[in-house]
Amino acid sequence: MTKRFDPAPTQLDLPALEERVLERWEAGDVFGRSLDATKDGPLWSFYDGPPTANGKPGVHHAVPRVFKDVFCRYRTMAGQYVPRRAGWDCHGLPVELAVEKELGFSGKQEIERYGIEAFNARCRESVLRHVGEHQELSRRMGYWVDQVNAYRTMDPDYIDAVWWSLKTIFDKGLLVEDYRVAPYCPRCGTALSDHEVAQGYATVSDPSVTVRFPLVDDERTLLVWTTTPWTLVSNTAVAVHPDVTYVTAKVGDELLVVAEPLVEKVLGENVEIVGSFPGRDLERRQYRRPFDLVEVPDAHYVTLATYVTTEDGTGLVHTAPAFGAEDLAVAREYGLPVVNPITPKGEFADDVPQVGGRFFKDADEYLTNDLRERGLLWKAETYEHAYPHCWRCDTPLINYATPSWYIRTTAVKDRLLAENARTDWHPETIRDGRYGDWLHNNIDWSLSRSRYWGTPLPVWRCDEGHLTCVGSRRELGALAGQDVEDLDPHRPFVDEITVPCRECGDSARRVPEVIDCWYDAGSMPFAQWGAPHRNEEAFRRQYPAKFIAEAIDQTRGWFYTLMAIGTLVFDRSAYETVLCLGHIVDAEGRKMSKHLGNILEPFELFDRHGADPVRWLLLCVGTPWANRRVSDAAIEEVVRKVLLTYWNTVSFFTLYASTGGWTPEGDKGEPTLMDRWLLSELNATVTEVTEGLASFDTTRAGRRLTQFVDDLSNWYVRRSPRRLW
């Protein structure tokens, strides 16, 4: 009789074994064949979020790929058709800043001297530089995804589709230009969107000052509070709440005005109150401003604003319209000027006395000391709080009045909330918690970026201010009267195309901005196909996705942009089920960083331990949304307790099956009690693993498999010696 089993090696070399399996998969096109075998089954659509490949892959890139792979494989094994296509995010600030660093640049002026065409060519090269390594990471860890036909957000067909979606939003009146206060990075020279800002907070210590503002033709002094002393240079007004009671308190020889609920907190106990009145009685009372360094005409009086609270400060709030959205709203209501002495580089203009040329944050200490010397400082404290920094260059952001293009997401807030309500979130608490809160506090999407390497905003404007939004290169060519189908739709090439204004016939030029790269990523459901200009049927068939999965911080990134764009353009979110994943930390729970020297390189881990134990650790140790403590010791424990136990059982079986010439077709005899018990455990394992994977709970599935391996090895095999040898 021909032996059916060859003995398995007693020593387990996982990396070598995995390479043999990978070679077999590739030689037999097993992934492709699995798709062919299920193509007539129910469609289970999946979207793969696009990483940026301008840097080498890290172990954190392995986390989402592991979870995506296991659930897509499970659905395929259940007979469903699960096409999956990789993609690359190619545009945006992260790419530009990396290229700036390579070239030794420190800002936009150097880029423009170098040339936009040459700079963008370097950006294009950089985003392809490490694609091969990212592809090898997916291959090495066994992630089945189509990498040959990967979409790229910089490809012309992709940009055509993005332009079409923006024109759709423009035609609905939801893409507008406005002069607003927005978070602005002085290093990058551009405004940022709210979801970008949310990714860059850092804890800092900042000053909190209370300043004397003497009233004109009155012996009283307003005590005004601010946490941004640098904005006092452009003070325009003081805001009070119209319905809050304010008091005049005598402290020494001074008569000080503060909100009644804050008297004790600001002035101390047993203060003599000599009068009280509602805030509205202070309206338009003139005061003397604390600094006279820039011209601010027709200003410096008290305004009314319901946003003023009595939770902090004094109940009187300093107003500088160029640096606060609420301040700007008050200025527009009262016709106050908007004065901005801060340059786009975040520095006071050189002609501003005393602080000219200083970075805005660096002026706080100097200005506070000056107030102290002139007797205007009532109190100065330092407080610790979360302050927004640029998510890519770590520069402190500034709220800065600037013209920008916005998508009016607030106009579809109710639809977004409705789409969120029917989304299957894992964990469920995200829907009404982290993400739900985000949607409830939704503000308009700051879309435009005053940068270079990105999808150009497809809006052309004539000298009369009339706007023309273009939905593709073909449409642009028809308007311009020339063939531009082969045009690279990036700057500076697209900037050279002029079109006649549809309203007045004058020549219109493209506005200079590019768009937020997160919009690119959120457009992938249709843009990966070039839809609707091409492949529209393929797009419609796979929209919306049944499943997506990324790190939990994407609640304010890709998860949001997918839902927002889908709702704006198609009135339907782009996904039905979303799995939020935890982050990678070291054995002590610390974030991995070069500074701490605790970074683990994925290929080195695979070479030492194999990819399977890393996959098992990520999938089965804790819920998917919990942070993963990854270390050599933790991976070795998986090998020892799970994989090696399983392998030893396989090795034992193949040895004796080979020696005894056993085949599965042979006589099995009557099942013993142990046999029936093991079969029962097997069926229970199948049921629980299936339920776990169906509910996106890999921890439950993994623990049950671990238990079964232990039962098989340490109970069944050890208690059946006479039957096995």
Image (cartoon, rainbow, N blue to C red):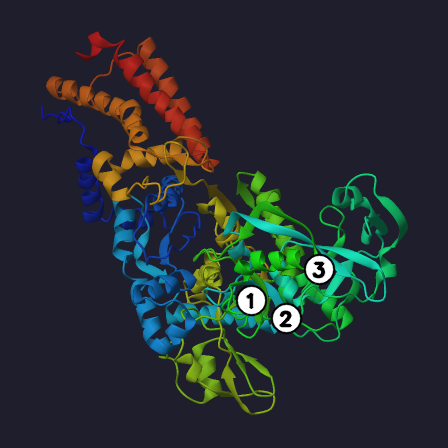
Residue farthest to the left, as pictured:
1
Q: Is residue 431 left or right of residue 591?
A: right
Mark nearest the camera among 3 and 1 is 1
Q: Amino acid at mark 1?
A: Val
Q: Residue 338, located in which quarter of the rendered image? A: bottom right
Label 1: how many residues lie within 10 Å, few (<14), some (14-19) or many (20+)?
A: many
Q: Is residue 114 left or right of residue 15?
A: right
Report x, y in % for residue 507.
52, 90
Tell me the residue at 11%/18% (across/down): 659
Name the residue beneath numbered marker 2.
293
Q: Amino acid at mark 3?
A: His
Q: Amino acid at mark 2?
A: Leu
Name the residue beneath numbered marker 1.
355
**Where 281 falls versus 592 (above or below)?**
below
Report x, y in % for residue 185.
50, 63
Q: Is residue 172 visible?
A: no
**Where 549 falls versus 574 (above or below)?**
above
Under circle 3, the secondary element is strand
Report x, y in % for residue 479.
49, 86
Residue farthest to the bottom, as pictured:
505
Mark nearest the camera among 3 and 2 is 2
Earlier in the chain: of badge 1 and badge 2, it is: 2
How far apart are the alpha carbons under marks 3 and 2? 16 Å
**Residues at badges 1 and 2 in contact (C-beta under 8 Å)?**
yes
Earlier in the chain: of badge 3 and badge 1, it is: 3
Q: Which disc number belongs to residue 318?
A: 3
Under circle 2, the secondary element is loop
* Nearest the eye: 224 or 653: 224
